[in-house]
Image (cartoon, helix red, strand yellow):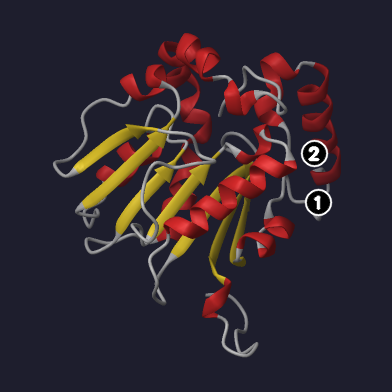
Amino acid sequence: MHHQAAPADAAGAEGTWDGHATRYKGQERLEARAIAAALRLADAGPDDRVVDVATGTGALLRALAAHQRRPATALGVDRSAGMLAEVGGLPQGWRVVRGDARRVPLPGGVADVVTCCYLLQLLGAEDRGRVLREARRLLAPGPGSRVVLVTPWADPRAPAGPLLNGLLRHVATAAPRRFGGLMPLDPTPELEAAGLVATRRVVLRRGGYPSLVVRAIPATRLDGGAFKGRA
């Protein structure tokens, strides 16, 4: 989770991430549970093509690589060369590329699964929309395409949920350069404008950063409003 930039300026702060890349892995343990949940919702198999947007130091890619039924191809995208330098070795056929999450340097339809962890809360509404539209653009046509997002969040229905979200928001607002990455965000209301619809949500309150994991599918999969329940 990127802590070292305010939400308003994080999209252009690759120099900041370069400077903190070597220390970033120290906090990956706080992201591990949410990343594991994201991989469960993504449910990527050998025939899937995965694109991990804002891959950072590659925590999701490394966790995915450890799966017995890992995809044959996976690609991580990040605008920080310093962060990408920390990814380390990946399976054959996997790679990373430098690029902006708002303008991913890949053609449309190249992925069956797009993941994006701990980025959206750093951005303003306009840039969040751009990232979500890019995720939708990257998805291949077909019934199996899906996007999985991870953001900081606490379930407001839980006894301490509103208090925790308020605390996270206060800390992120008071010290955005240091704790901007803790800003709570539920991206679900913004999915429709990007051509996506949420199908599953998992809220994690313990064992790391309080987080929300959302699985979404292309809205075009809905046939005359026939979609029901969770997929």
Tell me the SS state at disc 2: helix
Looking at numbered disc 2 in the image, what kind of residue is underneath it?
Answer: Asn
Horizontal and vertical percent for residue 169?
Answer: 80, 31
Binning the other alpha carbons within 10 Å of mark 2 as few (below 14), some (14 to 19) or many (20 upward) gives: many
Horizontal and vertical percent for residue 5?
Answer: 65, 19
Looking at numbered disc 1 in the image, what kind of residue is underneath it?
Answer: Pro
Res 164 → quadrant? top right
Q: Which of marks 1 and 2 is nearer the N terminus?
A: 1
Tell me the SS state at disc 1: loop
Count of marks placed on residues: 2
Spatial distance from mark 1 to mark 2, Cα to Cα?
Answer: 8 Å
Circles 1, 2 touching at the beta carbon (< 8 Å): yes
Horizontal and vertical percent for residue 229?
Answer: 62, 80
Q: State the residue lying farthest toward the left.
A: 92
Horizontal and vertical percent for residue 181?
Answer: 65, 28
Q: Mark 2 points at which residue?
A: 165
Res 61 → quadrant? top left
Q: Mark 1 points at which residue?
A: 156
Q: Identify the residue at image location x=79%, y=23%.
A: 171
Depth check, front residue: 30 or 180 = 180
Residue 23 visible in the displayed image: yes
Binning the other alpha carbons within 10 Å of mark 1 as few (below 14), some (14 to 19) or many (20 upward) gives: few
